[in-house]
Image (spheres, rainbow, N blue to C red):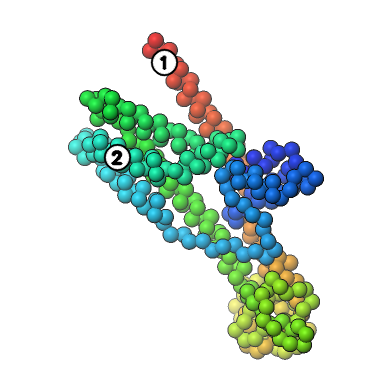
Amino acid sequence: CANRIEKVLNKKPFVQQAGVNFAVEEAQVVFDATQASETQIIEIIHKTGFSAHIKQTNELPIEKNTSIPWRLIVLWIINIPFLIGMLGMMSGSHHLMLPPIWQFALASIVQLWLAIPFYRGAIGSIRGGLANMDVLVSTGTLTIYLYSAFMLFYHANHAMGHVYFEASVMVIGFVSLGKFLEDRTKKHSLNSLSMLLQLTPKKVTVLRNEKWSEIALDQVNIGEIIRANQGERIAADGIIESGNGWCDESHLTGESRPEEKQKGGKVLAGAMVTEGSIIYRANQLGSQTLLGDMMNALSDAQGSKAPIARFADKVTSVFVPVVFSDFTCYFRTHLYSDE
C-alpha cells in the first residue's frame, strides 16, 4: 500500500518527491504549491483507496487495537471444513470433503462478502494505474469460484472432480491471515510511538497574568513558566526558575536513579518528578525537545528501507503484470492447441 501511494504521487508532474512511512502511516510530500494544493494531494491519495489528512503539530498517533478482527475469525471458521477435506484427500480419502452444494454455499459467503476488502483494494489499485496483490488475489479466486459454480450447475455429473471452491476459500483465508499479522506488527510500532509521546502530559499548570492556570499542552508557548509537582511529568525541555526536586529521566538517559534538580538546572520533557516541586521555563516544545528527537529518529528508522527491501519493492512492482502475462500466453497456447 505504501508503494502504491508513492508511485501514484511521484507520477504527478507537480510532485517533486513523495515518501510514505508504512510503520507510522505518514506521508511526506514535496510539491509545487503554485500548481497544486494540500487538498489536491489528499484527493489523489483518496483515489488510490486510502484516507488522509494534514498532520497537526504535536499530533499523537492513535493507539490501535491489535485483537483479531471478526471477519478473519468467520473466514477461518469457514476454512476448517475445507482444511479437513483436503487433509482427507491427501491421505486418499474423499469422504471428508463437503458435498459440492455445501462447498458452493460456504465459498459464496467468502467470495461475495468476506472478500470485499480485496475487491476494494484491487479497484483502488487499478484506479491508481497499478496492479497490486489484491488484483491478483481477487482475479484468481473469483475465476476459480465462477468456474467451479459453472461446473456444479451445468456439468453436475462431473462436478465433484472439477470444482475447486476450497482453493478460492483457502487462498483468501491465508492471505487475510498474512495481512492481519502484517497489520498487527505495524500497530505495535504505532503503539510504541504512542507510548513514548504519552510521556508528556496532556495538561500543564502555567503562570499567566500572575495566576496559575491549567491548560492543554498544545496551548503552551515557548518562554512560559510551568509548574510540575511531585508525581507529574515535565512537559518541555527547559531551565528551572525556582524550586528543587528529583526527576526520573531513565527514558532518555538510561539512568535508573532519579537525578536531583535545582535552580538553574535543566529539565527534559517526559521526566517524572518523583519528589519536590519544580517551576521551570519552557525552552523547547513538542518535536523540538530531546524526546521529540528520539521520536523522529525512531520514526525514521521504522520507515527506512534496507537494500533488500527496495529490491523486493522492484520485484513486486512487476510480479502481478508478469503473472497475468504468463496466464494469457498459457490460455492462448492451450486454446490454439485444442483447435
Q: Whole-percent x and y of residue 274?
A: 61, 84
- Circle 2 packing at 10 Å, graded few (<14), some (14-19), many (20+), is few
Q: Visible in this render: residue 182?
A: yes
Q: Quadrant of residue 142?
A: top left
Observer-nearest of 204 and 200: 204
Residue indicated by mark 1: 335
Q: Whole-percent x and y of residue 291?
A: 67, 68
Q: Whole-percent x and y of residue 314?
A: 60, 37
Q: Which amino acid, by three-letter code, is at mark 2?
A: Ala
Q: CA distance from mark 1 to mark 2?
A: 31 Å
> Which comes sooner in the sequence, label 1 or label 2?
2
* Residue at the outermost top position: 339
Q: Quadrant of residue 229?
A: bottom right
Residue indicated by mark 2: 105
Q: Whole-percent x and y of residue 166?
A: 32, 37
Observer-nearest of 105 and 330: 105
**Left or right of residue 243, residue 84 in this image:** left
**What residue lies at 24% left-to-right and 30% top-to-bottom?**
160
